[in-house]
Image: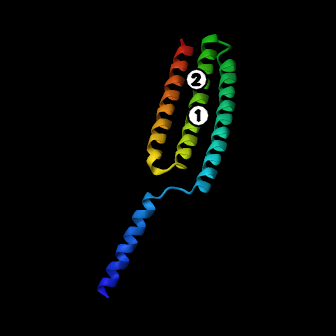
């Protein structure tokens, strides 16, 4: 009886370990990728709406001061670019989940590198527009 309990405990432990190392099925992940794309598109659209509101607000409250308007436009463009970069990163990461484990980490590293590049570009563009 004691051996039987140990066997079940061992099987349960192996099942838990196996579940930790499994990756999503391609069908589920394909839907996840599509959901991530749609969410990213919605987020970018919302960021554009907010950016437009911010620029209009700067025009009204700043009395049309070109410096304030330029700052609002630069900030708005940065916010949209960052939202887009975050969405693209999420989609790319979801796509990586469809790959075999041996290729998954390289894919994620590439997605992270592209995200960091997009962030740096957005920051540089914002800085250039603010001057």
In screen coordinates, is 2 left or right of 72? Answer: left
Give neighbour class at mark 1: few <14, some 14-19, many 20+ (Cα, 10 Å): many
Q: Residue 49: x and y, percent?
A: 69, 31
Q: Residue at x 66, y 22 (%)?
A: 55
Of helix, strand and loop, which one carries label 1? helix
Q: Residue 93: x and y, percent?
A: 53, 43
| 77 and 119: which is toward the camera | 119
The disc, 1 or 2, on the residue closer to the chain's N-terminal end is: 2
Up-down: is 82 above or below 73? below
Up-down: is 60 above or below 23? above
Of helix, strand and loop, which one carries label 2? helix
| 23 and 123: which is toward the camera | 23
Q: Residue 65: x and y, percent?
A: 64, 12
Q: Residue at x 60, y 33 (%)?
A: 84
Q: Residue at x 60, y 56 (%)?
A: 28
Q: Mark 1 or mark 2, which is nearer to you?
A: 1
Give neighbour class at mark 2: few <14, some 14-19, many 20+ (Cα, 10 Å): many
| 121 and 126: which is toward the camera | 121
Q: Residue at x 56, y 45 (%)?
A: 95
Q: Which residue is mark 1?
A: 83
Mark 1 and mark 2: Cα distance apart in space: 12 Å
Residue found farthest to the bottom: 1
Q: Which residue is mark 2?
A: 75
In screen coordinates, is 59 left or right of 116? Answer: right
Instruction: Answer with the quarter of the image where residue 48 lies.
Output: top right
């Amino acid at each position: 009886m004691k051996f039987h309990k140990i066997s079940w405990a061992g099987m349960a432990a192996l099942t838990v370990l196996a579940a930790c190392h499994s990756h999503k099925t391609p069908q589920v992940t394909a839907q996840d990728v599509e959901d991530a794309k749609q969410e990213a598109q919605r987020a970018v659209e919302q960021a554009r709406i907010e950016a437009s509101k911010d620029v209009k607000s700067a025009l009204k409250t700043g009395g049309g001061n070109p410096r304030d308007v330029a700052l609002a436009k630069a900030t708005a463009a940065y916010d949209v670019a960052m939202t887009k970069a975050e969405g693209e990163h999420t989609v790319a990461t979801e796509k990586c989940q469809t790959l075999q484990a041996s290729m998954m980490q390289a894919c994620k590293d590439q997605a992270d590198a592209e995200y960091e590049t997009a962030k740096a570009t957005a920051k540089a563009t914002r800085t250039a527009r603010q001057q």
